[in-house]
Image (cartoon, grey):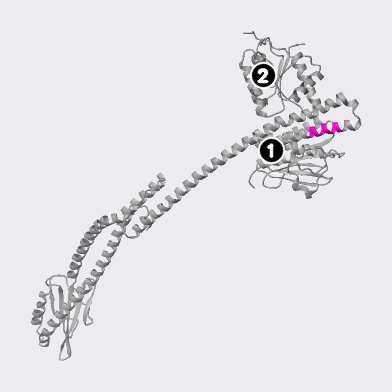
Amino acid sequence: MNSRPILLVEDNRDDVELTVMALKESKITNPVVVASNGVEALDYLFGTGTHAGRDSSLQPVVVLLDIKLPLLSGIDVLRRMREDERTRRTPVVMLTSSDERQDIAATYDLGANSYVRKPVEFEGFVVAARQLGLYWTVLNEPPEPAPGR
Amino acid sequence: MRILRPLTIRQKLTSMAMISSFIALLSASIAFLAYDLHTIRQSLARRILTDAQIVGFNSISPLLFNDAETATATLGGLKAEPAVVAAVIRGQDAAQPFAAYFRDGPSAPRPSFPAQLAAGPQFAADHLLVSEPIRFEGRPIGTLVIQADLAEIRDRQRRYASIVLAVLGGSLLLALGISRLTEKTISRPIVRLADTARAVSSQKDYSVRAEGAGRDEIGLLVGTFNEMLDEIQRQDSDLKEARTDLERRVETRTRDLAAANKELEAFSYSVSHDLRAPLRAIDGFSKAVLTDYGPQLDERGRHYLERVRAGTLRMSQLIDDLLGLARVSRRELVRKRADVSEIAGQVAAELARRQPARTVHVQVQPGLRAEADPHLLTIVFENLMGNAWKFTGKKPDAHIEVGQRADGPAPTFYVRDNGAGFDMEYADKLFGAFQRLHAEADFEGTGIGLATVHRIVARHGGRIWAEGRVDEGATFYFTLERNL
């Protein structure tokens, strides 16, 4: 099992707690790093701002990215990630409430690896979190860490 | 006048002038000729009659004294009248002429005179005969017969005819010249009017005007034409103004509508994202309470928490359905040839897959086709057949039938079931959002499905209605075409 962290980009504290709870319930042991807005997420990924000094060559095993975020939307974050050499290959799963076609299309166009709509029902949410966690931390073969600059 | 039809107006005017002049002159000439013929015959007859009376009187004494020589000499006096061809004096014995005169000499062919002749002048085809009785003291003693030829009349008529022909020809030439000069005053304004009309129709320029042309009917026509152009120009500018105004208004409306649409889109986007998150929290934490603190709660407490969770899920379903309804309204309608039977079949298969425990006899009429948006049509059948599936849930032998009604001008599709049905009294409430005719406890649902179907059918320009009886089933009919 890959022990690299999972980056959860989510502004809603309830959703953060529920996601962590669901991951825990699914026996996913990877550490969960939470970024509550788009800027913070990019800071973490690129080792800038509040995360200055972090080794940006160490990319999370998967980024769980909400779309509706303060400051920078999830779509903007995804775009920046795909534009940068270091995060170009980092797996990104859109984890969001909406199932708007335009969002689904836009994020796939920008290179999202998956799009999952968060079920309202907690049991469903737990199932989704478990499958996501297992898939991205166990089953999926992550890309080689990009060379640091 | 059919011959004149293909001619130009100039040619028509000239032809008419020529024909009129010719007919007038010809009639006048014929009348004069006839009158002249009559006059000259009268005068010839009178002249010969006078000669006959004189010669007759001078022949009394030769006749009395039986002096044929003198009588012949007297007849010779007729030489002064060149028209006289022959003259004969008959005595009492009509068979033997008493004396005779022949203009062209005795050797020339002699005309024969009829034995009996009425007194006075008598015209034949080529001659005139005048018979004058000779009397002495009231007693007839003989008859003088004179024959005159009509060469004089013929000559005169011939001369007259040539003069008439000359005058006719001259007059016609003159008429031609005059009509050539005058027809321009008629045809030129008409030609100009036609040019103007052509310019108006080809260039759509309503500001041009035909030039005025006097006070006659053509002038009136030109004036009226110009008035008509005034009116057209005015209406044209009114129309252009109205169109510009309309375009401006449409533009404004379109902009307003686009803004409203965008707002609505932003709204439903927000709803889609933001309304679900709190529900997830409510459900998730209720579940957490149940899991972590369940043992500390009594039965009632756990029941309440389950109700909270059920309410949350229902709310979530409502949001999904409402978003679906909004999406159906926003989505662009793409009409295609849709295989209705196949769509209904797929929907039926999906329903059976979701509830494999149920046995429902679904019968779909094969070969159904429609010009419609296949995606929206699928939503229609998902809702209608989903309802039929749901409301037959308490029937032991559930039947669903999808077909097309043969009657009516537009193809009418229907979905029929033998389920719970409904009371026709409330049929008008079927298609309103959040309207339900059954208790939630009996049949679950949000009451948005039929509103969505109604919206889709309306967007296709069609119509939807339903028939039903409580506990006997329901039939939903819909059309997908505008018109009719």
Towards the viewer: A104 or A27:
A27
What's the residue at 24%, 56% (across, down)?
Answer: B177
Q: Residues within 10 Å of mark 1 (few under 14, many from 20)?
A: some
Q: Which residue is mark 2?
A: A40
Q: Nearer the viewer, residue A124 or B374?
A: A124
Which segment did they paint magenta?
A: B304-314
Q: Quadrant of residue B178?
A: bottom left
Reply above or below: B478 against B134: above
Residue type indicated by callout 2:
Glu
Give the residue drawn at x 74%, y 34%. Answer: B319
Mark 2 is surrounded, within 10 Å at the Cα level, by few (under 14), some (14 to 19) or many (20 or more) other residues, namely many
Q: Farthest residue in the bottom direction?
A: B137
Residue B202 percent coordinates (x, y): 40, 45
Residue B205 falls inside the magenta stretch: no
Q: Chain of mark 2?
A: A
Q: Chain of mark 1?
A: B
Q: Amino acid at mark 1?
A: Arg
Would you say the magenta stretch is mainly helix, strand or loop?
helix
| Residue indicated by mark 1 | B369
Marks 1 and 2 belong to one chain: no
* Residue B97 image-quadrant placement: bottom left
